[in-house]
Image (cartoon, rainbow, N blue to C red):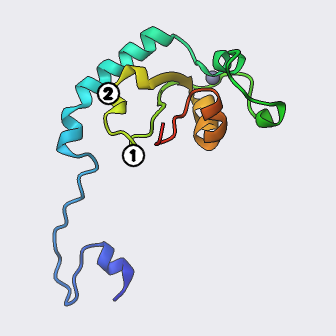
Amino acid sequence: MEEGRHALGVQEGGLLVKRTRLNPISKKRRAALPARSAVIREVHERDQHCQFISRLWAPESGWEEGDLVGVPTRCSGPLDVHEIVRRSQNSKAWLDPEACVLLCRRHHEVVTLNPKLGHMLGLVKWSWE
Ligand SMILES: [Zn+2]
């Protein structure tokens, strides 16, 4: 069968069938959105600005020079609420302000792409922690 025809919802024999899109967000998740909005507001009010650089200079962060190669030292982009614990590891973390921190878009990407560095800065937690 041709891929294209299948994707358009045309069945073999030329019959057109209506396909409903998969709901991109579950009802349970949709119901939690107002609570998530409250968490986002709280984290913005608490943190005010990107927490990456201050975490970098915190005495307890154990990074070495080599860990910072290519890491931007300036913030850029809008502020995102970053979840320290991945949603796949703890489905309730996104509704817990203590499990979230404010990061600029640039540093959010840095942490996402370098979880080891993020972990050193306390911006990522492993599933077993
Ligand atoms: Zn930043």
Label 2 near ligand 1 (CB < 8 Å)? no
Q: In the displayed structure, does residue 30 sit left or right of residue 129?
A: left
Q: Is residue 41 visible?
A: yes
Q: Give the SS element for disc 1.
A: loop
Residue drawn 22% across and 37% down?
30
Image height check: is 45 above or below 128?
A: above
Number of other residues with Cα within 10 Å of mark 1, as a class: few under 14, some 14 to 19, many 20 or more: few
Dot 1 corresponds to which residue?
88
| Residue occupying image coordinates x 60% and y 40% | 115
Q: Left or right of 93: which side holds 72? A: right
Q: Quadrant of residue 100?
A: top left
Amino acid type of the residue tagged 1 in the rendering: Ser
Q: Earlier in the sequence, mark 2 or mark 1?
A: 1
Residue identifier under label 2: 95
Observer able to see residue 70: no
Residue 67, compared with residue 15, is above or below; it is above
Q: Residue at x 57, y 30 (%)?
A: 105
Q: Position of residue 48 (x, y in %)?
A: 51, 10
Q: Which residue ends up furthest to the front in the rendered image?
A: 128
**Where's ligand 1: which quadrant?**
top right
Pinpoint residue 38: horizontal percent, then vertical percent. Answer: 30, 18
Name the quadrant of the N terminus: bottom left
State if disc 1 and disc 2 touch (CB < 8 Å): no
Labelled disc at residue 39: none
Instruction: Name which quarter of the figure residue 57 lies in.
Output: top right
Distance from mark 1 CB to nearest ligand 1 atom below 8 Å: no
**Relative to 74, does residue 13 appear above or below in the rendering?**
below
Position of 37 with respect to 83 (left or right) is left
